[in-house]
């Protein structure tokens, strides 16, 4: 049973097996406790400075008094797609290797102070102050502004004008 | 399509332990990954989910921090502050090295520090966005089509745990993007734009961050008062309506761009005043969900200082030139080569 | 990440009336959500209350969750809204400071540590848990440790781990489980002794 919980939490049980396991959960059972401690282990591994948490027991208490929620069925149930048999993929691995070899991949090493100059890039001309107006006008509508917020404008703030 | 997931996976840091054995195992695994298309679909949703969180958190959270921006062998530090007030969001960005440069944004308005005072840069009606604006669905669907989104490992940025997400383009005409999302708050702590050889084209990262009530709010009055031509409008009740109006404004232009990279859609076309210009300028904006290209068209003011040419800084490139008696400028977060292709394909199709 | 499918499956069970499934979701996300909310609500005891409220709110709102986003994305938004409403209701805005000095501002790390310290007892407990987990991990045979690390820290699926470690998936499954159990065995006495406390 414990191993099933371990596999379930990783999403590696087939749906029917998961359903059957979940059907067996009773309040206060070992399933609950094992699930809890296995998740604690993962959280601690990822974040060593974690905070203590006695939360789940208290929420469980409060939940008991809550009216049971029910949602109408009928929305599309996501089909769990299981990975395909390994043998089918083997024939593609050759292609994969070639491609992999051709790309010079190195683990992302973090910010590099001296960045590689892309040889194909044209001569790097200082953006003139006037050009900055276009840049700002562009930033107003660029999706990068949605994602990065004001940080996108750092491009306009960061220029070194020729002290006009 | 074939090569993308593998190299991208490797880039996401799942190759941390770079032993020879692991490398061989990964090589063998490549084929597997190709076959498991369903994994990509899940990951796509997961990656987009993070982006939604990032946008949400960025708009919702009061924060202030120091941002280090690296581009073209340069490093610049700035302080960025974002606050949420009853009348909307306020954002300030100020340079921490060199001469004072400052930008304040509120309600779609942008103020810039010029000649020792804050000057409002745009005069058209403020962009009305939802208070805690999520990414526009349009933008997300464009992104979904043009990029593979995939989660990487958890990495530490300046001491905080972040989830990495990589957005890998489907062609080489645009950049890849990698983001580091703080797992607790959802804030974007680091972002980089990657070029063809997976080199970092530009990158910014927080080195210090402060949240919540202790962030200074006193500068907000300054932003409201300075250079203000009229009061900011009250918060609009209906957001969707306003956005619909904006969409209607996208009319068919007399200007045609033949060689846009696949997946770029026109998202805006407006006549707008611009700082330092005497007449309104036409701006047409195309986007693929993550990058944008703006085309500005205006009458040629025969400015001798305007040197025709290709400029670039970090991920942004710009090119302008007189075409058919008009000054055409193209700005975009795309590789210079792509920008030139776009520029060269612009033509006038009107009277 | 296949564990999102688990979330979806659990959500669907909750929507069919299975409250226990929600308990599992709470167990899974309690620390994450707690950390998020503690960024807004400084006092640890209040933060915990607000986190509980957020979970209850999420439970009540679950019928309306259609899986258009990942469960945690949805939960996260509820967490933020609950925290903000709480702050508004209690008017917890710190008055604006007059100066804005880079040197004076707290760094993120410091602030977070300040918030997380509760009683010396809890601090000690927290540290003990971390120590036990780390020590247990070190004591594991290498193949078990690698499997667990690849799963929990790198987020690889069983299939990916099988490929990396060059072994069958069944072995991966077994190694991860045995690693977890080994660590859990050391943890359980620690957790049992503090029953009735905040743990």
Image (cartoon, rainbow, N blue to C red):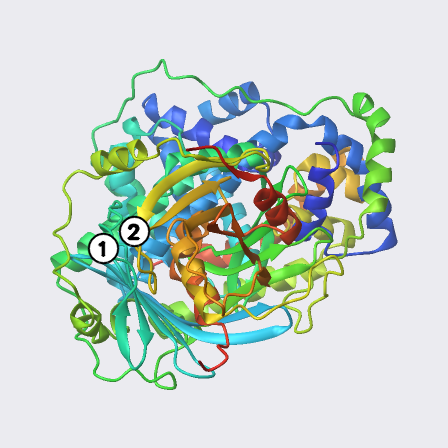
Nearer to us in this view, C75 or B220: B220
Q: Height in image: B103 above or below B13?
A: below
Nearer to us in this view, B252 or C91: B252
Chain of the residue where label 2 is placed in the rendered structure: C
Chain of the residue where label 1 is placed in the rendered structure: C
Residue that badge 1 annotates? C84
* Residue B196 makes an appearance in the image: yes
Mark 2 closeness class: few <14, some 14–19, many ≥20 residues within 10 Å = many
Q: CA distance from mark 1 to mark 2?
A: 6 Å
Nearer to us in this view, C183 or A45: A45
Residue that badge 2 annotates? C80
Q: What residue is drawn where x is 25% and y is 27%?
A: A68
* Residue B175 makes an appearance in the image: no
Kindly indicate whether the residue at mark 2 contacts the one at mark 1 (C-beta within 8 angstroms).
Answer: yes
Mark 1 closeness class: few <14, some 14–19, many ≥20 residues within 10 Å = some
Residue B207 point in image, percent of width and height: 49, 73
Q: Height in image: B50 above or below B201?
A: above
Determine the secondary structure under disc 1.
Answer: helix
Q: Height in image: A75 above or below B75?
A: above
Residue B250 point in image, percent of width and height: 35, 34
Q: What residue is drawn where x is 39% and y is 67%?
A: C122
Determine the secondary structure under disc 2.
Answer: helix
Q: Where is residue B39, by image quadrant?
A: top right
- A10 displayed left or right of A92: left
Residue B25 point in image, percent of width and height: 83, 43
């Amino acid at each position: 049973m414990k191993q099933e919980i371990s596999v379930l939490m990783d999403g590696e049980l087939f749906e029917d097996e998961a359903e059957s396991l979940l059907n067996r959960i009773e309040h206060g059972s070992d399933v609950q406790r094992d699930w809890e401690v296995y998740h604690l282990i993962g959280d601690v591994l990822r974040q060593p400075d974690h905070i203590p948490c006695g939360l789940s027991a208290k929420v469980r208490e409060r939940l008991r008094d809550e009216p049971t929620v029910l949602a109408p069925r009928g929305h599309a149930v996501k089909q769990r797609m299981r990975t395909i048999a390994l043998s089918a993929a083997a024939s593609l691995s050759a292609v994969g290797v070639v491609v992999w070899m051709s790309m010079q991949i190195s683990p992302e090493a973090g910010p590099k102070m001296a960045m590689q100059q892309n040889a194909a890039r044209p001569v790097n001309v200082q953006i003139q102050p006037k050009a900055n107006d276009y840049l700002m006008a562009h930033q107003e509508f660029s999706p990068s502004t949605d994602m990065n917020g004001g940080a996108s404008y750092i491009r306009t703030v960061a220029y070194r004008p020729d002290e006009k | 399509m074939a090569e993308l997931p593998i190299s991208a996976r490797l880039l996401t840091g799942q190759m941390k332990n770079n032993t020879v054995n692991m490398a061989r195992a990964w090589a063998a695994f490549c084929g597997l990954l190709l076959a498991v298309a369903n994994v990509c679909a899940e990951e796509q949703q997961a990656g987009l989910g993070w982006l939604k969180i990032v946008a949400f958190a960025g708009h919702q959270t009061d924060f202030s921090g120091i941002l280090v921006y690296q581009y073209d062998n340069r490093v610049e530090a700035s302080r960025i502050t974002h606050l949420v007030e009853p009348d909307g969001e306020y954002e300030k960005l100020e340079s921490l090295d060199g001469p004072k440069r400052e930008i304040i944004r509120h309600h779609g308005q942008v103020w810039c520090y010029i000649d020792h005072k804050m000057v409002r840069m745009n005069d058209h009606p403020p962009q009305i966005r939802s208070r805690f604006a999520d990414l526009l669905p349009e933008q997300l669907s464009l992104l979904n089509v043009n990029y593979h989104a995939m989660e990487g490992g958890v990495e530490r940025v300046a001491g905080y745990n972040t989830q990495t997400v990589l957005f890998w383009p489907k062609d080489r005409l645009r950049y890849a993007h990698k983001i580091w999302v703080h797992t607790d708050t959802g804030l974007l702590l680091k972002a980089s734009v990657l070029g063809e050889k997976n080199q970092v084209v530009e990158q910014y990262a927080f080195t210090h961050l402060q949240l919540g009530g202790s962030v200074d709010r006193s500068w907000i009055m300054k932003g409201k008062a300075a250079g203000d031509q009229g009061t900011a409008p009250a918060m609009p009740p209906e957001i969707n309506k306003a956005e619909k109006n904006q969409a209607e404004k996208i009319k068919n232009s007399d200007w045609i761009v033949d060689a846009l990279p696949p997946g770029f859609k026109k998202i805006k076309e407006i006549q707008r005043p611009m700082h330092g210009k005497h007449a309104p300028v036409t701006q047409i904006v195309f986007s693929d969900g993550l990058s944008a290209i703006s085309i500005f068209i205006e009458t040629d003011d025969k400015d001798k200082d305007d040197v025709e040419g290709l400029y670039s800084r970090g991920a942004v490139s710009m090119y302008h030139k007189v075409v058919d008696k008009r000054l055409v400028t193209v700005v975009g977060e795309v590789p210079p080569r792509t920008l030139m292709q776009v520029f060269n394909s612009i033509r006038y199709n009107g009277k | 990440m296949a564990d999102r499918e688990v979330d979806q499956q659990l959500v669907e069970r909750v929507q069919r009336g299975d409250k226990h499934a929600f308990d599992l979701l709470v167990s899974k996300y309690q620390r994450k959500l707690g950390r998020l909310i503690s960024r807004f609500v400084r006092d640890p005891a209040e933060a915990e209350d607000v986190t509980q409220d957020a979970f209850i709110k999420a439970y009540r709102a679950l019928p309306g969750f259609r899986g258009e986003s990942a469960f945690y994305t949805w939960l996260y938004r509820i967490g933020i809204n609950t925290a903000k409403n709480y702050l508004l209701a209690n008017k917890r805005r710190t008055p604006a400071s007059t100066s804005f000095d880079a040197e004076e501002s707290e760094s993120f790390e410091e602030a977070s540590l300040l918030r997380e310290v509760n009683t010396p007892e809890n601090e000690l407990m927290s540290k003990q848990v971390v120590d036990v987990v780390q020590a247990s991990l070190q004591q594991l045979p290498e193949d078990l440790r690698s499997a667990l690390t690849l799963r929990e820290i790198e987020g690889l699926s069983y299939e990916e781990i099988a490929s990396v470690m060059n072994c069958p998936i069944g072995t991966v499954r077994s190694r991860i489980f045995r690693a977890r159990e080994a660590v859990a065995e050391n943890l359980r006495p620690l957790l049992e002794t503090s029953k009735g406390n905040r743990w």
